[in-house]
Amino acid sequence: MVGTIIIILNVFLILYISSVQATFSVQHFSVT
């Protein structure tokens, strides 16, 4: 049970980090 929760949290964390990096790259591309 606890392992499943940790896996779900890891997935959300990866998705959040990837989305943040995507927005940063898009903003940088727009500025350039």
Image (tube, rainbow, N blue to C red):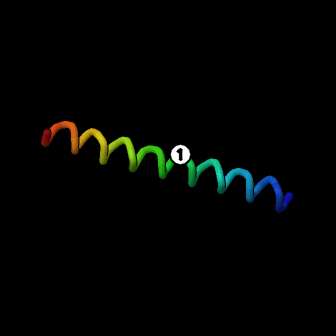
Residue 27 vs 13, above or below: the answer is above
Q: Secondary structure at mark 1?
A: helix
How many circles with numbers are drawn on the protein?
Answer: 1
Depth order, front residue of 13/5: 13
Residue depicted at 37% across the width and 41% down the height: 22
Locate residue 15 relative to residue 28 in the image: left or right.
right
Depth order, front residue of 1/23: 23
Residue depicted at 83% across the width and 62% down the height: 2
- The image position of residue 20, as x and y in percent, is 39, 50
Locate residue 29 relative to residue 14 in the image: left or right.
left
The N terminus, quarter of image: bottom right
- The image position of residue 14, as x and y in percent, is 56, 49
Q: Residue furthest front?
A: 32
Residue depicted at 65% across the width and 54% down the height: 10
Locate residue 2 relative to residue 7 in the image: left or right.
right
Q: Residue furthest bottom?
A: 2
Q: Residues within 10 Å of mark 1 (few under 14, many from 20)?
A: few
Q: Which residue is mark 1?
A: 15
Image-quadrant location for residue 25: top left
Residue type at tag 1: Leu
Q: Residue furthest left?
A: 31
The C terminus, quarter of image: top left
- The image position of residue 18, as x and y in percent, is 47, 45
Residue depicted at 13% across the width and 42% down the height: 31
Image-quadrant location for residue 27: top left
